[in-house]
Image: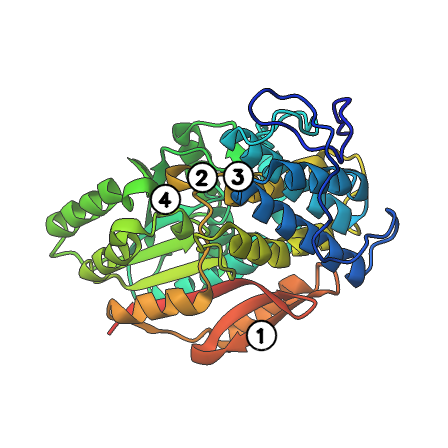
Amino acid sequence: MMQFTEIPPFLPMNNNNNQILTTRARPWPSFPTPKPPGPSTSGDSNCMEQLLVHCATAIESNDATLAQQILWVLHNLAPPDGDSSQRLTSAFLRALIHRAANSKLLTAMPNSGDLTAVSSHKFSIIELASFVDLTPYHRFGFTAANSAIIDAIDKYSIVHIVDLSLTHGMQIPTLIDSIAGRAWTGPDPPLIKLTVAGSTEDYPPMLDLSYDELGSKLVNFARSKNVVLEFRVIPSSSSNGFSSLIDHLRLQQLLRSEIKEALIVNCHMMLHYVPENNSYRTNFIESLRSLNPTMVVLVDEDADFMSNDLVSRLRSAYNYLWIPYDNVDALLAKGSKQREWYEADICWKIENVIAHEGARRVERLETKSKWVERMRNAGFGGVGFGEDAINEVKSMLDEHAAGWGMKKEEGDHVVLTWKGHNVVFATAWVPV
């Protein structure tokens, strides 16, 4: 539990000598009086959001007095072990404390423990597989993408899959299962060449396994399914648009220009880490188009964390990241390790969105509509997901809580929803 230093919360601080002034605190800005902690309601959540907004505004305007007052109220209103709305607010509170600490605005703040809020846990393969299977958050993209990929590679004897994934290849075993169970036009399943972009950055969830060890496990798993898999890792960085990966793919294209080989690029929750400055995202998509791939699958979160204005970004993040907190209460027991890892992953995202700027702020989500525009401008056309894909996604969702759903949007893109709110989108593209 956070603890404040022994400083009267409503007395302003002198920023020059850190002494408490004896003048009266200024009036509160106009917002509703919060209710005591207890079962959250929509009104409580709205109130906490307004308090966070006022606190962020105070920090940005260097108003140490008001910032400290609101931090105190939030600290008492939103314990880190409370209900879902309180835990969400507590995570934003810690992020704002970290931002204030970075700016050296306040010298007396709540003691939030580890201000970085980063999950340092490195998952074993079994732990990560279990973590990924907790919710449809990743499984939705896996299921939709695998179905589209299987249809696209039907007439190829060699398939090169480039996996740009946040989940360290956790999608590949399910894809291999689908390939092994498919009736192919040839006598055998196609040869699968898997290239993994070994990101040089550490984004949670992290894996306690080298890429060589991961590749060995995937090759052995494929062999057990009578699928031939070749594995290659290309160290590459999202910070420059995976330029070394693109260079490698261009070279491979030249070397194999006479071979009929399908090229599938699978982008799962990774492209939002490519910076938006210097046109890196646009350049990356255009580079993919120049490779004339058989298909590009793009799966990501349907939210907007792009604003340079902290308050706008906070509102957008708060009104999106309530979703994982809302569904975890019925999913995992309070105090369990899995719940700790799950919520640490969300806290890492919140801190990155709120506490950092510049190159350190890497969680820069864009909405589906923006990615659709970018793909079309680069010369790609959308491919609708077939009935088989839709049915597979629906069957997968039946294994999870009743609040999860799916809808088809313009262009036959599919979207994962929680209680009617967009969460993750899945799209498939071919050159036009």
Whether pointer 2 and pointer 3 mark residues with C-beta atoms closer than 8 Å, the reply is no
Do tag 1 and tag 2 residues touch (Cβ < 8 Å)? no
Q: Nearer the viewer, mark 4 or mark 3?
A: 3
The disc label shown at residue 355, or none: 3
Name the residue type under label 3. Ala
Q: Secondary structure at mark 4?
A: strand
State how far apart marks 4 and 1 are (Cα): 34 Å
Q: Which residue is labeled 1 in the image?
A: 407
From the image, state whether disc 1 or disc 2 is nearer to you. Answer: 1
The label number, if any, that marks residue 218 in the structure image: 2
Discs 4, 2 touching: Cβ within 8 Å = yes
Q: Which residue is mark 4?
A: 229
Task: Name the spot of residue 43 as percent of width and height, x first.
Answer: 79, 62
What's the residue at 86%, 46% (across, down)? 37
Element under label 2?
helix
Q: Earlier in the sequence, mark 2 or mark 3?
A: 2
Would you say the residues marked 4 and 3 are in contact, meaning their CB atoms lie under 8 Å apart?
no
Viewed as shown, does residue 338 lie left or right of 62? right
Other residues around mark 4 within 10 Å, as few (<14) / some (14–19) / many (≥20):
many
Q: Residues within 10 Å of mark 2 (few under 14, many from 20)?
A: many
Determine the residue positioned at 37% across, 39% down: 359
Three-letter residue code for mark 4: Leu
Q: Quadrant of the C terminus?
A: bottom left
